[in-house]
Image: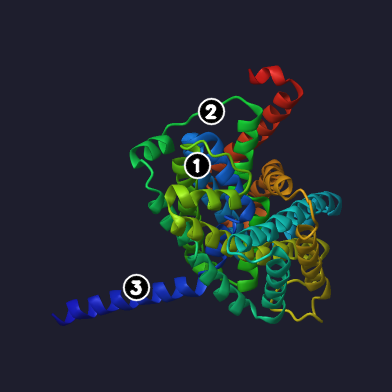
């Protein structure tokens, strides 16, 4: 009896210890994955479902598998090497390649940041708040959060914001889709050989597995100083974040397909989707959708400029990180500030092509993704860098298939654009 009690107590202590270790490591994986469902992403999902109904739902499962594998590689490299991805690329591929890559990512992330503040404006306007009020206030809030708070405080706030994505799941349930039809569409692939479908497909993958995610996750893991012995908890953080965020993606696609597509409602923005939901799924579903848009936009408006500041400073070798003061890392905070100002200012320009920037930024992400994946796969399979933590065969298979698929889709898009008759 005494031995049994001692064994049970030991197992209980071990369980509590594991839970505490997981909670200590929790953060980078979940935050990175949830920021992925940003204003540009929600707009892309909404437009895709309103245009094609459930015909793109089948992409969610393979994209989730690819997202888990790609994000896990970033976390593992951060834990094992203690260096950010941009730092490793510079050390192993040279300054010229790094500068070209960083320049492309910088332009893409400025466009992404514009889309986040456009999302803030759209969500606020649904609630009756003009953009000239909501956008400057949002810009100030995200700037103060990063510049004045410690990494631990920032991470806790980000985790709280992640919880609000449940609004999209509730909104999806309230839309009452035909779940039999939805589940069938989720497992039976359908493909249309047209320029618009291919463009939307690339946009979906580009917003689900965005290039900036690999840089932010790895930098966050490095700044958190997670030891190799506790890596399994970081891996769980990544897996949970990727699965839950794509559940949110699934519900957004299903909600819009069941309502707007079914009723032939054409939309161009996530704001259009939220407003159109009111007569079709009820005003509370519409309010939840718009609340989710505002939350996602503010969340991502904090993280995307931060990501850019991380990888640019790492690539050049400057001090970077939220735990540094403004005096210790002036370029890091200066770049962060500049991107926020540019992003917010463009949204306030009358007649600015915001929808174009939002959709195009996701397509640019999809086109840049293969290049980032090639660098990641080469680095993570280098035993000099990773030791015994190189990729498994499964990890390499998923990584290279994802890379090849994105390259192929990009080439098909070019072919269809140059030779329209190929689209039939």
Q: CA distance from mark 2 to mark 3?
A: 46 Å
Q: Within 10 Å of the Cα at label 1, are there few (<14), some (14-19), or many (20+) other Cα atoms?
A: many
Indicate left or right for 113 with 186 as reference.
right
In which quadrant of the rendered image does the C terminus lie?
Answer: top right
Identity of the residue drawn at 49% across and 65% down: 164
User: Could you say whether the residue bearing mark 1 is in a helix, strand or loop?
Assistant: helix
Residue 260: image tag: 1
Q: Are marks 1 and 3 in contact (CB under 8 Å)?
A: no
Residue bearing the label numbered 2: 191
Identity of the residue drawn at 62% across and 64% down: 124
Q: Nearer the viewer, residue 220 or 124?
A: 124
Q: Residue furthest left?
A: 1
Precedes in sequence: disc 2 or disc 1: 2
Q: Nearer the viewer, mark 2 or mark 3?
A: 2
In which quadrant of the rendered image does the N terminus lie?
Answer: bottom left
Q: Are marks 2 and 3 in contact (CB under 8 Å)?
A: no
Precedes in sequence: disc 2 or disc 3: 3
Q: CA distance from mark 2 to mark 1?
A: 21 Å
């Amino acid at each position: 009896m005494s031995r049994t009690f001692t064994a049970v107590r030991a197992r209980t202590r071990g369980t509590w210890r594991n839970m505490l270790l997981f909670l200590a490591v929790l953060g980078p994986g979940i935050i990175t994955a949830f920021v992925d469902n940003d204003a540009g992403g929600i707009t892309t999902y909404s437009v895709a479902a309103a245009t094609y109904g459930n015909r793109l739902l089948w992409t969610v499962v393979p994209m989730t598998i690819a997202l888990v594998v790609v994000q896990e590689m970033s976390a593992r490299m951060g834990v094992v090497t203690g260096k950010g991805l941009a730092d490793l690329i510079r050390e192993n591929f040279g300054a010229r390649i790094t500068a070209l890559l960083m320049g492309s990512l910088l332009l893409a992330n400025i466009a992404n940041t514009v889309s986040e503040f456009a999302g803030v404006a759209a969500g606020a306007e649904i609630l009756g708040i003009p953009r000239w009020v909501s956008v400057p206030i949002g810009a100030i809030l995200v700037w103060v959060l990063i510049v004045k708070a410690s990494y631990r405080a920032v991470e806790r706030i980000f985790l709280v914001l992640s919880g609000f994505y449940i609004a999209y799941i509730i909104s999806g349930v309230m839309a009452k889709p035909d779940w039999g039809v939805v589940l069938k569409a989720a497992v039976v692939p359908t493909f249309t050989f047209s320029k618009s479908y291919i463009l939307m497909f690339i946009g979906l993958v580009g917003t689900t597995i965005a290039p900036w995610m690999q840089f932010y996750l790895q930098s966050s893991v490095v700044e958190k100083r997670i030891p190799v012995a506790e890596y399994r908890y970081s891996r769980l953080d990544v897996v949970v974040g990727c699965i839950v965020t794509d559940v949110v993606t699934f519900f957004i696609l299903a909600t819009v397909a069941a309502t707007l597509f079914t009723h032939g409602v054409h939309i161009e923005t996530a704001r259009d989707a939220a407003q159109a939901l009111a007569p079709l799924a009820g005003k509370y579903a519409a309010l939840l959708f718009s609340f989710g848009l505002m939350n996602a936009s503010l969340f991502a408006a904090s993280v995307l400029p931060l990501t850019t500041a991380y990888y640019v400073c790492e690539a050049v070798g400057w001090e970077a990180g939220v735990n540094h003061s403004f005096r210790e890392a002036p370029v890091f905070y200066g770049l962060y500030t500049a991107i926020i100002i540019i992003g917010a200012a463009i949204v306030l320009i009358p007649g600015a092509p915001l929808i174009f920037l939002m959709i195009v930024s996701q397509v640019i992400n999809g086109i840049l993704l293969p290049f980032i994946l090639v660098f990641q796969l080469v680095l993570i399979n280098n035993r000099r860098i990773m030791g015994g933590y190189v990729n498994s065969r499964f990890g390499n298979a998923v990584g290279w298939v994802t890379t090849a698929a994105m390259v192929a889709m990009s080439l098909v898009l070019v072919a269809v654009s140059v030779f329209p008759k190929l689209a039939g």
